[in-house]
Amino acid sequence: MRMTETYPQTGTGSAPGSADVVLELQALQKSYGAAKILAGVDFQIRRGEFVCVVGPSGSGKTTLLKCMAGLLEPSGGQTVFEGAPVTEPPAKLAVVFQDYSRSLLPWMTVWANVELPMRNKFGKAERPARIESVLEAVGLAGKGSLYPWQMSGGMQQRAAIARGLAYQPDVLLMDEPFAAVDAQTRIELEDLVLRVRAEFDTTVVFVTHDIDEAVYLGDRVIVLSGAPTTVSRNLAVDLPAPRNQVRTKSLPEYARLRAEVFELIQSAKSHATIR
Amino acid sequence: MSTFPSTRSRGGIRLILLRAWLPAGLVAAWWLASASSTSLYFPPLQTILETLGADWAGPSFAGHLLPSIGKFLAGFLIAAVAGIFLGLVIGMYPALRAAVEPIVQFLRSLPPPVLLPVGLLVFGIGASMNIAIIAFGAVWPTLLNTIDGVRSLDPQLTEMTRSYRLTRAQKIRWVILPNASPQIFAGLRTTLQMAIILIVVSEMVASTNGIGYYVLNSQQTFAVPQTWAGTLVLGALGYLANLVFIRIEGYVLRWQAGLLAITGSGA
Amino acid sequence: MEMTTQIRQLPAQAREGTGRRTAPRRSFAAGRTGRMALGAGTVVAVMAVWEVLARSGAFPPGSIPPASAVLAEFIGQLGTLGFWEALWNTVSVALLGLLLIVVVASPLALLIGLVRPVQESVWFVLEFLKPIPPVALIPLGLLLWGPSPGMKLFLIVMGAIWPLLTQLIYGIREINGVGAEMARSYRLGRWLTVSRLVVPSVLPFALTGLRISASIAVIVAVVTEMIGGAAGLGQNIVVAQSAGALAEMYALILAAGLLGLAINAGFRGLAKPLLFWHPSIRQEGTL
């Protein structure tokens, strides 16, 4: 049984062809041999948006993100970033990886980790001030001389976010960035991401399997079906900004959105098992 | 790598005594047992030490010790640099690795001393032969470990370097080499041991100076205290070389020591 | 020669990958047959270059004969009794030495690994003896015993015992930690503890140590034969060299290399069924 490929558009202003579209997936497909993971994924990200992509486990979220990031060549369709098809990782796009312990370099201090990708973008003189400012923004001011393994998981993920921000991308892709931290740290980091996104005026695509997180963070939530994956719904999130862990989450609209996403994921799961 | 944690971590005079009694006792026992020895083969330790002092603080220092150290360092450094460089290149290209694998496996399995006659034929007797034998015979552990270390790169780190568009040189300098460095150093440690073996043996076979030459020459001329003294110097040299190496390793891999201490894993 | 051992794996590297990896690229070099073909091709190419260089006189005169001559001599050697005697002399003493090493090192390692005061007492002596080059004792051995099998055996044990001893101590101390508490809390009893916990956890260390000890044993055996004149492969090499029988000398060197390869292959063959659960086997690469 197949999910509809022309998904219902509940979002208000997400009409295709809009001028400020920064990232667009066009019928993106990916197969590994006979296994079809992505079966034509379409959506658009507009400049300044915070979009959460949520899907059941095994729905190819990471595959999708890698195709968007230019790390993986799609089997069909394409990703268009700022008007050009993505064939390699674009210079104006940064990725914050799921597992900070495997993406930060343990032989370098936090400062050097943040500085490394900047080497090709910023002159030597510009870097220190910028590093200071991103470390400050993620709450790691004065912690630059520590090694990643001297810090807690939450702090390490902050450092990874700082590295992404310092790269000054137009779009920041985040791959389940808080999957490995404890619940309280996760809450802190969620609010941190919302804050720095406003401060640095970055477009964020946030991939997660956590429904609450998706609804809480996103201006829009894209719900994926189970593999082979398509977009099962594209939901506008009409929750007032700034978000607040207590107030936002007690709004009836939040509960309604959460329920809707939950239903979609559950049905995607059951279809996936039948298949 | 030291078999046991260093004294510093736990300290205490009791520990120092505990560690000192056996070596001190062994030396004392040797001293006493050999004091009145008239055996040709087991001269008194006192005689050995006197020979050692007279010889190695005197003419043999410049005549044998310094040349040995120079040749050893040259050979070891060539082996280290060549092993790391070639290992890096071979590790980065799977096709190249497949191509050279049988040859490399054969050469690393060769007991290095059998190369001595070849070295003699190609280089004759002298320093260049000693250095060449060390370089060619001791390079393999570093080469193989570097290849392995390069290949052990976490795929997520590869993706990170791609997504942040690091250049090849940056990737090698900041990611591949540091990632491989624990394995490179494990290989270098074996290369070091092999280099010490080879300097001694190659000087025994093809040199007119150096400690290896001195010891074998002493044995062949039945200069027994000299043989004993030279053996002690060789032992001390091996010990010191290892000590220096461990210091350097500890400095370069200090991030790893910290990481292991924090995560609490490892033997 | 120690290969990729004694390095403490970082937890980050040991972690199982999450998410899907990049699809493996199917190239010629990736397949098993492709790899073997490439390797064989290089061997043939190296032989060919060697042959051409030797025949064209690019090597120093009287240093390296053509590959074909060496190969022919090697095949010829395989048919002579002297070759097999020499090989047996080398291998048997190395094996005997290795056996002695196991017999001496095992109880020593138990004592050092389990009894704290012993551990501390022998610390300096071990740390001092370990890095001493095993060949340093050859002149002394020659002086005391002459070129006899006993001298060879003594030097092999003195030179090659350290890797096994060190690795065994590591292994024994490893069980002292977490596993021992597990065994106690589940009240496994002596037999289960030894068979299911002690042996499997020490085994990888023992095999690593034994492999390094074995290659050092062969090195020491060959060197004592070359320098001390004890009978064996090493002596034959030196004799061939001084007689100017170059092809024979290179054929014997080839044999020594193949012996080393056989030892390595033997250990790999031993490790596979014994350590099938160990990460180093599960993700074993080729090189």
Image (spheres, grey):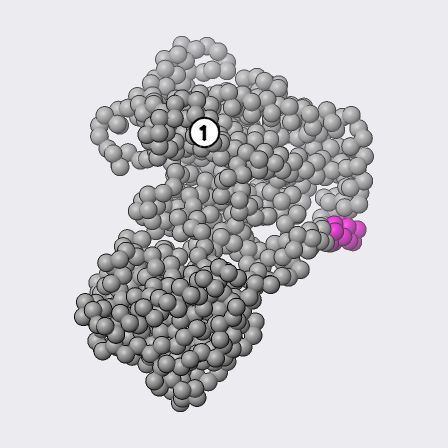
- Residue B96, image x, y percentages: 62, 57
Q: Residue at x 52, y 68 (%)?
A: A1
Q: Residue at x 63, y 49 (%)?
A: B101
* Prevailing secondary structure of the magenta residues: helix
Q: Residue at x 39, y 48 (%)?
A: C11
Q: Amino acid at mark 1?
A: Arg
> Taking C217 as reference, is A56 left or right?
left
Q: Quadrant of residue C186?
A: top left
- Mark 1 belongs to chain: C
Give the residue number, with chain letter if any, for mark 1.
C196
Give the residues in magenta: C44-57
Crowding at dot 1, Cα within 10 Å, few <14 / some 14-19 / many 20+, comes out as few
Q: Quadrant of residue C185?
A: top left
> Taking C183 as reference, is B169 left or right?
right
- Residue B24, image x, y percentages: 32, 21
Q: Is residue C241 visible?
A: no
Q: Residue at x 35, y 32 (%)?
A: C182
